[in-house]
Structure formats: C-alpha cells, structure tokens
Image: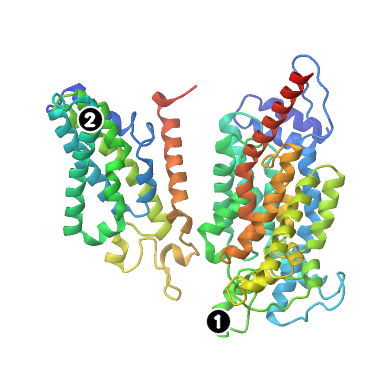
C-alpha cells in the first residue's frame, strides 16, 4: 500500500484479526446476537456501523482540542446520535423492509460499545486521518464477525443466503423443501436447523468463532 | 497370550503416539489399569468412575429392553393389527417376539449412532489434548437413545450428539467439569433445532411419519398423553397402562414401573442420590396439588386440562420419572451438598410440573427444569457452604 504508511495500515489490519473488537475485546456483542439471523441484515448493520464510526471518529478528532473533558461523553453521544439518525432515515427511505427487520437495532448503534470505545480511546487523542482509518478498521472487524456468524446462521437455519436461491432457482440454495417436489439436500432427508434462528445459537456460533480464532492465532494464546 | 497381556503390549507399543488414548481406553474398559501411583502411597477404592457408570448402565438395560417391546407394540397398535393389553404387566400381547423385532431394528441403530458418534468425538478430543479418554460418555451414550422419539432420523441424532458432547461438555474441560447434563443438552438441541421431529402426534410411534403422508391421515394418531391433554383432548389410557408403560412417548421413558425398580437399584447400590429423587417427587406432588386446588376456578381456560389432572398422575406421565431418576441425579451436574440436594431436587419437581402446565408447547418440562437447576446447582452449593462456614465461625466465637 503506497497510500498508507505501515503504522496507518496497522490501524486497519489490527482490528480485523489480532485485536478484533468482538472476538478479542468482546464489545458490541448485543447487536451481534440480535441481527445475525439474516446475512442481509448483518451486512447492512456492518455498513451502518462503519459509516457512524468512521465519520464520528473524524468529527470527534477534529473537535478533540475544544471539547471540555467534563462533558466529552455527552458530546460523543450527540455526534453518534446525529450520525445514527442519518443512517436510520436513509434506511427508511431506500430500504424500508430492511429497516423494519433491523427495527430498534439501528437506533441502538448509539449504545454500541465499540463506538463509544473508539471515540473515547482513539479519536480524542489522534489526528482526523488516523481516526478515520481506525474507525474503518474497527467497523470492518465488527462487520467481518457479523457476516461470518450470519452466514452460518442463515444457511443452516433457512437453507438460503441473501434470498439468492429464492430469486434465481425459486427455492432455497440447499434445495426445495416443499413436500412432493423436494430436491437437493432436502430430498436426502435434510432439514433446516430451527435452533440456528434463535439468539442462543448466535452466542454459541460466536463462541465457536472465538474458539477457532484463539486456537489458530499464536498472539492470542493465554497461559 | 491372554488378551490382557496383548493389550498391555499394544499399550506400550503405542506409548507416546497420538493413538495412545485409544488403546488405553480399551484396556481400562476391560481390565483394571495396571498403573501405580508415581509418588507416595494412596488407597484405591474398587468403586471408581467406571464402576459407577457401569452400575447406571445395568440399571438402564431393563428399560432399554422394555422400550424395544414397547416400540413394536405401539407400532402394531397404530396399525390396528393387535389389541390393547388387557391383562397385567406380563401380558403376552406385549411381550411378543414380533413386537421385540420391530423395536430392536429401530432402537439398536439409535444406540449404535449415539455411541459411535459420541465416543468418536471423545477420542478426537482425547488425542488432541493428549489425555486419557474419559468414561463420561458411557452413560450419556445409553441415555441418549432412550430420551428421543423412536422415529428420529439418525443424522439428526448424530449432529445433536456432536453438539452436546462438544458444547455441553468438552468446552468446559470434559467429564466432571460440565455444567449441563450432556444427554439433556443433546435432547434440548434436538428439541429446539428440529421441533417437528420432537413434538406433535406422529413422531412417537415407529413409522407414523411415513404413513401419515398417505391418504387416511385422521385414522392414525400416536399422541403422547401430555400432548393430547395440552390440546384439550381426552386420552384413552388407564392409570395401569401409564404405570406399566404401555403408552407412546420417547423411547425409554414410558415405563414408570421399571424406572422405579432402577431407582431402587441405584439407591441401594448408593450410586444415585435418594435425596434428589425424593425431593423431586415431593416438589412435583406439591406443585400438582396446588394446581389441583386452583383448577376449578380456571375451568374453560387452556390450562384447565393439565391442571385438573390428579396430582399424582404427573409422576407417571412423560419423562418425569426417567429424568428424575437418571438425569437429575447425575453426580457432576447436581448439587453436591446434602441440603443443596434437597433444594435442587425440590425445584426440579416443582418447575417440571409448572412448565408442563403453563406452557403446553413444552410438554417435556422435566428436561428444561433439570437444565435450569443444573445451572443453579453451583450457586445453591455456594450458599449452603457459605452458611456452614458462617455457622462454624460463630460457634468458634462463642466457645
């Protein structure tokens, strides 16, 4: 990357793997459990958080020298809330159905621990460009886990992904589950796993992701 | 050369390799291990974990054999080929070879899948971690086929076993460290993942799901008693049939009589805790009795049928007896303190009946009740032990 210095690139790369906000810092778990039943919702959520976090980091960073430290939390909340309202309105205008699926969770981005955490820990002490990169990196780290969890939950829970199967084949990706015209895996006796759609399973899938990551990544080994 | 020597030789040969636990496991399964303590001396009791497990399995064998006869009996009854049992427990209509053969063919695969998959996972983890294979799965593997519906597809059982052993046990550190009863974790997974195979009126009788796809749908029904009560229907089984176990239900849970005998066996061999069993029964009777008292004022509501059922009949129905005798007494997940056992058991009984009555979608309240109390068992113990420490401190002060 000629565009970024090594130090800047680390801002994006670190939160993706070694210092992932969800699996390593265990922040932002609530929304990871709530909206990962569908891949589409998870992707939109990841993009929304990226927007709020990257822009919010820049705004906070620009103001970092004029915010009185006593009221900094309130200022951070105002910035986050303003950005979340923009996201919410855009979703309502251009993706109404999706915004209904995500319901309160778009509004609850404000309370996402990752956002306040990055504002407080990074943006208040770094330049706007670095803060922007940090926001992108952390939101991407959050998004990647969301997408992984949602991928397994939707595929195993409904047999479809992003509605692709329904759109192009007229039935879920794994086959047609309707009795009488079964095909694919369903013809072999396969059935969707309803547990995958319940949020306890999101916690378990997330746990397995953390398990795999910790056992593969030597930097995360604990004694 | 005797088998024992041969095994010992194999064990030495594979020492230090990855497959070592495999040979060790077979060796210890068949013979007392020839290992001695490395330092100092210690006394070994004969009654190690393996013996404990084997005793529970011995208690389960009659239940397993009965369940094979019952699977065949329910199968032919649903087909209309035989009449209902009219005599006592040893009626020839029930104990016929044709009944047994149907059940045998159906249930043995469940047992094989349960053991193969479960032990396979255990071996994998033992090899990975480099420790001995633990005996923990011996009992779980026998319990699992007994608590699922007879018609459950084998691949579902396999997935559930993998889930139960890995998430329910191995992630906590293996046998002895688990918080939840692995067998019930497996059943709970099936229950929430594939509800159409775990509830309803078709899955409890061999082949009913297949036959239900044919034309005469209404002609056949294999509902459990709890299922039909929750749906507000009458059931047509006598108390005697419930007690003997000639009713549809999960594979091995139906016969309260045999489970009672197994309970006595476990109590006298000092394997199962009588405190837990007794307090669970008291809890269930207590809750059932309260429901009986308030039932008349709720006539016409959806709870009425289950509430008005005589309180002692709850003990005969569903998986209550099986769960209390074989699952609640699991020494790993139950409370360890004497007082704690009373509390733990009492709440299992109470919650089972409460879930059963208030949520007809979950007729198997006993499964959820035991899992819930499994989670609370350490807390109960903590409070009891804390209380003991406090009392002794006070005694020291006054003395």
- Is B51 in front, or is B243? B243
Quadrant location, the C terminus of chain B: top right
Where is residue A211? Give x, y as percent: 46, 36
Disc 1 or disc 2, which is closer to the eye?
2
Q: How many numbered markers are drawn?
A: 2
What is the CA distance from the residue labelled 1 to the residue labelled 2?
72 Å
Where is residue B304? Give x, y as percent: 63, 72
Q: Which residue is mark 2?
A: A71
Quadrant location, the N terminus of chain B: top right
Q: Residue at point 55% right, 81% down?
A: B214
Q: Mark 1 Cα within 10 Å, few/some/many (few <14, many 20+)?
A: few
- Is B276 in front, or is A145? B276
Report whether residue B22 is seen.
no
Q: Which residue is mark 1?
A: B214
Where is residue B143? Give x, y as percent: 69, 52
Looking at the image, residue B235 sits to the left or right of residue B55; the answer is: left
Q: Mark 2 Cα within 10 Å, few/some/many (few <14, many 20+)?
A: few
- Is B78 in front, or is A55? A55
């Amino acid at each position: 990357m000629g565009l970024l210095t090594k130090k800047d690139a680390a801002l994006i790369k670190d939160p993706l793997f070694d210092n992932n906000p969800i699996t390593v810092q265990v922040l932002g778990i609530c929304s990871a459990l709530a909206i990962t039943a569908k891949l589409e919702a998870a992707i939109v959520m990841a993009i929304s958080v990226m927007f709020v976090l990257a822009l919010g980091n820049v705004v906070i960073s620009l103001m970092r020298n004029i915010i009185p430290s006593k009221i900094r939390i309130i200022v951070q909340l105002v910035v986050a809330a303003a950005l979340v309202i923009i996201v919410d309105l855009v979703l309502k205008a251009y993706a109404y159905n999706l915004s209904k699926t995500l319901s309160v969770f778009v509004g609850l981005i404000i309370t996402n621990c990752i956002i306040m955490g990055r504002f407080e820990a990074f943006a208040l002490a770094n330049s706007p460009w670095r803060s922007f990169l940090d926001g992108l990196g952390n939101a991407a780290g959050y998004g990647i886990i969301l997408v992984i969890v949602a991928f397994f939950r939707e595929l195993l829970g409904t047999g479809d992904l992003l509605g692709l199967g329904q759109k192009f084949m007229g039935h879920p990706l794994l086959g047609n589950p309707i009795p009488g015209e079964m095909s694919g895996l369903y013809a072999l006796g396969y059935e969707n796993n309803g547990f995958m759609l319940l949020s306890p399973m999101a916690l378990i899938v997330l746990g397995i992701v953390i398990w795999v990551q910790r056992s593969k990544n030597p930097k995360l080994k604990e004694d | 050369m005797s088998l024992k020597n041969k095994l010992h030789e194999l064990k030495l040969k594979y020492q230090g390799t990855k497959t070592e636990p495999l040979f060790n496991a077979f060796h210890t399964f068949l013979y007392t291990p020839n290992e001695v303590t490395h330092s100092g001396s210690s006394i070994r009791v004969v009654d190690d974990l393996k013996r404990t497990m084997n005793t529970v399995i011995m208690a389960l064998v009659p239940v397993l054999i009965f369940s094979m006869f019952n699977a065949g009996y329910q199968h032919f009854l649903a087909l209309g080929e035989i009449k209902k049992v009219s005599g006592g427990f040893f009626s020839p209509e029930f104990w016929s070879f044709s009944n047994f053969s149907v059940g045998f063919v159906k249930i043995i695969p469940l047992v094989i899948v349960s053991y193969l998959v479960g032990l396979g996972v255990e071996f994998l983890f033992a090899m990975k971690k480099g420790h001995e294979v633990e005996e923990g799965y011996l009992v779980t593997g026998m319990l699992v086929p007994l608590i699922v519906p007879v018609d459950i597809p084998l691949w579902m059982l396999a997935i559930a076993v993998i889930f139960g052993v890995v998430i329910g046990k191995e992630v906590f550190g293996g046998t002895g460290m688990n918080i939840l009863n692995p067998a019930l974790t497996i059943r709970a997974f099936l229950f929430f993942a594939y509800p159409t195979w775990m509830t309803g009126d078709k899955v409890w009788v061999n082949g009913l799901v297949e036959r239900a796809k044919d034309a005469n749908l209404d002609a056949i029904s294999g509902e459990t008693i709890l299922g039909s009560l929750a749906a507000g229907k009458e059931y047509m089984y006598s108390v005697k049939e419930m007690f003997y176990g000639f009713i549809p239900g999960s594979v091995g849970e139906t016969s309260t009589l045999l489970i009672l005998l197994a309970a006595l066996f476990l109590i006298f061999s000092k394997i199962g805790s009588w405190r837990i069993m007794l307090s669970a029964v008291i809890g269930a009777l207590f809750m059932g009795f309260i429901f009986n008292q308030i039932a008349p004022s709720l006539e016409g509501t959806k709870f009425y049928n289950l509430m008005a059922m005589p309180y002692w009949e709850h003990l005969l129905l569903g998986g209550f007896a099986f769960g209390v005798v074989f699952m609640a007494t699991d020494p790993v997940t139950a409370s360890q303190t004497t007082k704690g056992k009373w509390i733990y058991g009492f709440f299992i009984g109470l919650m089972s009946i409460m879930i059963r009555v208030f949520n007809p979608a979950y007729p198997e309240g006993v499964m959820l009740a035991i899992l819930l109390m499994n989670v609370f068992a350490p807390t109960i113990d903590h409070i009891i032990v804390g209380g003991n420490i406090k009392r002794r401190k006070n005694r020291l002060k006054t003395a």
